[in-house]
Amino acid sequence: MLASDSPLDTTLRSGSALPKRCAKCGARSELERRSHVFTWTPRWALPLIWVPFTSRIWARRAPIAFFLCPVCAKRWSDGSAVQIAALALVALPFGASHLLAQPALFFALFPLAAAGALYITRSSARARQLYATFIDFDRDHVTLGGLHPDVVAALKRCTSSRRSRRTPSPD
């Protein structure tokens, strides 16, 4: 299954590099090369992530190199700090209930803290979102989403020119 969910989803070989443009905004100058191991888990295995080690068993990983401009690189790096802050926000009701010796306080505060953590991680992740929509069983190909349309077009031009060089011209 190498089908794409969106016209901007692009399938490429694992370990390859995207064209030299910012993957998020399409800029061409002052680019910083990044390498990231993208992870994808089949939808049927998502309920199993609560069972220890099953996410490691079913998750598929594929490394891809890409480029980011300084603005997008900052957003990418800031995403990690936001995730840590969200984790601290979720831990807050636990600490507050123990400090105040009110176990019921945990149950009152936890849904609010979890909703707040989910909101801030989702809003910060939008700027950072390059994601794997599919990684095949052999981990040879990965389908990426969240790419800028100029990067997708440059990648298609690049792959079509490679194919045309491989096919011999009929004489």
Image (spheres, grey):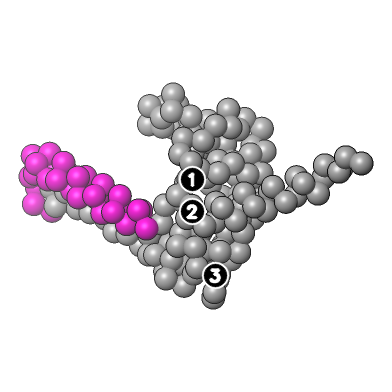
Bin the neighbour count of mark 2 within 10 Å (Cα to Cα): few under 14, some 14-19, many 20 and up.
some
The reply, left or right, for residue 88 in relation to residue 137 is left
**Residue 149: numbered disc:** 2
Q: Amino acid at mark 2?
A: Pro
Could you say which is closer to the camera, residue 14 or residue 27?
Answer: 27
Could you say which is closer to the camera, residue 52 or residue 11?
Answer: 11
How far apart are the two marked residues, 3 and 2, measured between alpha carbons?
13 Å
Above or below: residue 117 compared with residue 138: below
Bin the neighbour count of mark 3 within 10 Å (Cα to Cα): few under 14, some 14-19, many 20 and up.
some
What is the span of residues highlighted in magenta in the rendered image? Answer: 99-127
Q: Secondary structure at mark 3?
A: loop
Q: Amino acid at mark 3?
A: Arg
x 48%, y 29%: residue: 42
How far apart are the two marked residues, 3 and 1, measured between alpha carbons?
19 Å
Residue underneath mark 1: 8
Q: Amino acid at mark 1?
A: Leu
User: Principal SS element in the magenta part?
Assistant: helix
Residue underneath mark 3: 28
- Pinpoint residue 4: horizontal percent, then vertical percent: 51, 35
How far apart are the two marked residues, 1 and 2, measured between alpha carbons?
6 Å
Bin the neighbour count of mark 1 within 10 Å (Cα to Cα): few under 14, some 14-19, many 20 and up.
some
In the rendered image, the residue lying farthest to the bottom is 30
> Is residue 125 inside the magenta stretch?
yes
- Circles 1 and 2 in contact, beta carbons < 8 Å: yes
